[in-house]
């Protein structure tokens, strides 16, 4: 129990440091910041490891938990959540492994390399059916 409490407090401290860093770098809106914090807390709760020890498989497992089948999600809203969280996680892990670099200079660490985003098919179909 002590170790999990330690990981939890370390996780919260890392999230706090990241949000402070983001405030000075990009000044995000409160809603955007809350979305990031929610995503990072959900990741930590599901994977139960420190951020530094998470692997690509852990992150993909977390992101895939948001995917839903066509009958359950005909509007592909889960794809939007997946894509938003993948952006949050890519930015976060780039910061985590290179906090002293500028955002544009930060390389992607291996744990997030080649994580793909998905296309929302209903958005494409509605665009294609729009008459100009």
Image (tube, grey):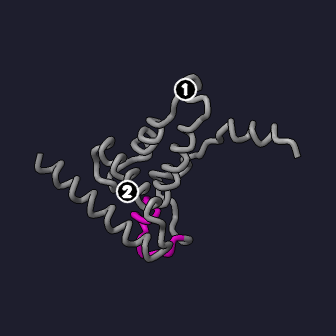
Q: Which residue lies furthest to the left in this view?
A: 2
Residue at 38% from the left image edge and 52% from the top image edge: 38
Residue at 36% from the left image edge and 49% from the top image edge: 54
Q: Which mark is residue 46?
A: none
Q: Which residue lies furthest to the front in this view?
A: 131
Residue nearer the viewer, 124 or 31? 31
Residue at 57% from the left image edge and 40% from the top image edge: 79
Q: In which quarter of the image is residue 93?
A: bottom left
Q: 93 above or below 71?
A: below
What residue did someone put label 2 on?
37
Bounds of the magenta span? Answer: 92-103
Q: Distance between the residues labelled 2 and 1?
A: 27 Å
Q: In which quarter of the image is the N terminus?
A: top left
Residue 84 spot, x, y in % from top left? 52, 50
Could you tell me which secondary element the residue under label 1 belongs to? loop
Residue 34 spot, x, y in % from top left? 40, 58
Residue nearer the viewer, 71 or 5? 71
Q: Disc 2, disc 1: CB below 8 Å?
A: no
Residue 86 spot, x, y in % from top left? 51, 50
* Crowding at mark 1 (Cα within 10 Å: few <14, some 14-19, many 20+): few
Residue at 33% from the left image edge and 54% from the top image edge: 51
What residue did someone put label 1 on?
69
* Crowding at mark 2 (Cα within 10 Å: few <14, some 14-19, many 20+): some
Q: Quadrant of residue 15?
A: bottom left
> In the drawing, does residue 116 fall left or right of residue 36?
right
Could you tell me which secondary element the residue under label 2 belongs to? helix
Residue 72 spot, x, y in % from top left? 53, 25
């Amino acid at each position: 129990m002590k170790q999990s409490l330690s990981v939890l407090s370390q996780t919260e401290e890392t999230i706090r440091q990241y949000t402070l860093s983001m405030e000075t770098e990009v000044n995000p809106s409160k809603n955007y910041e809350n979305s990031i914090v929610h995503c990072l807390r959900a990741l930590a709760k599901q994977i139960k490891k420190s951020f530094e020890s998470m692997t690509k498989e852990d992150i993909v497992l977390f992101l895939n938990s948001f995917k839903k089948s066509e009958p359950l999600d005909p509007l592909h809203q889960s794809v939007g959540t997946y894509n938003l969280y993948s952006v949050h996680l890519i930015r976060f892990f780039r910061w985590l492994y290179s906090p002293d670099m500028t955002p544009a200079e930060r390389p992607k660490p291996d744990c997030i390399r080649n994580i793909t985003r998905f296309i929302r098919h209903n958005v494409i179909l509605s665009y294609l059916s729009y008459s100009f």
